[in-house]
Amino acid sequence: MTIDERCIRQTEAEIARLEKALEEAFERRGASRSAWEAWKAAAERFRCYRSPVFELWSDEARVAILQGNGAWRESAMLYLALSPRFLRSGYLRDRLCHLLKQCDLSMCERSELRAILLETLVRRPSTGRFRHDCRLAARWADDEFTARVRELSTRKDGWVRGRARRMLDVIEQNEKLWSSKP
């Protein structure tokens, strides 16, 4: 099982295609019996679509992400970095944030995750619930990351400034909880 950028982007594109076909069939469903059947067929194709990306919901993936085994954690980090947009993609992103918050990440993984989280501050539109990003940031923030978020919180762009301030608030509120400092 490999979940790489190509797989994630293909899933995003295929779900968008299936969703569009379903929408179009829905609009025409009352025109005739065959249009009704076409709508039902489009709904069934949408419902039956399976992607390797959906395996990130599995118990196997959950355990492996938490333990750091195999390619699951790498796939979870890639999913956060790419932040795909499709039906239920935000729910999956929230779950992965929650799992990564519980992990014992290596220094390299922490650094990569911080870079991903900084990118989420400026990305439009966002996916998932931003509070999960903030909680994850609070878990893995270091002084350099916090300084960078603080810098972004002074930007003129209201979107970035507001998101950075929210993240900074959560980091500061949780500093004692996650800090290794006495």
Image (cartoon, helix red, strand yellow):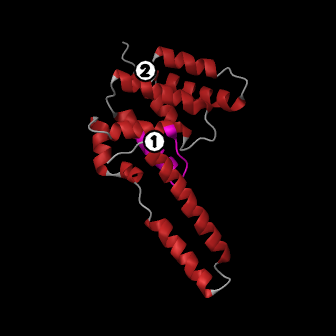
Horizontal side of 178 relative to 31 (left or right) equals: left
Which numbered marker is on residue 5?
1
Please report the bounds of the magenta region as a residue range: 82-98
Rendered view: 45 above or below 51: below
Residue at the spot 65% in from the left edge and 29% down from the top edge = 160
Horizontal side of 154 relative to 140 (left or right) equals: right
Residue at the spot 54% in from the left edge and 27% down from the top edge = 118
Mark 2: few, some, or many residues within 10 Å (few <14, many ≥20)? Answer: few
Mark 1: few, some, or many residues within 10 Å (few <14, many ≥20)? Answer: some
| Residue 108 placement (x, y as % from top left) | 37, 23
Q: Secondary structure at mark 2?
A: helix
- Residue that extends furthest to the bottom in the rendered view of this protein: 33
Q: What count of labels does the image hold?
A: 2
Which badge, 1 or 2, comes first in the chain's sequence?
1
Residue at the spot 47% in from the left edge and 33% down from the top edge = 135
Rendered view: 26 above or below 61: below
Horizontal side of 121 relative to 136 (left or right) equals: right
Can the viewer see residue 5? yes
Circle 2: residue type? Lys
Residue at the spot 56% in from the left edge and 18% down from the top edge = 148
The verdict on residue 92 being magenta is yes
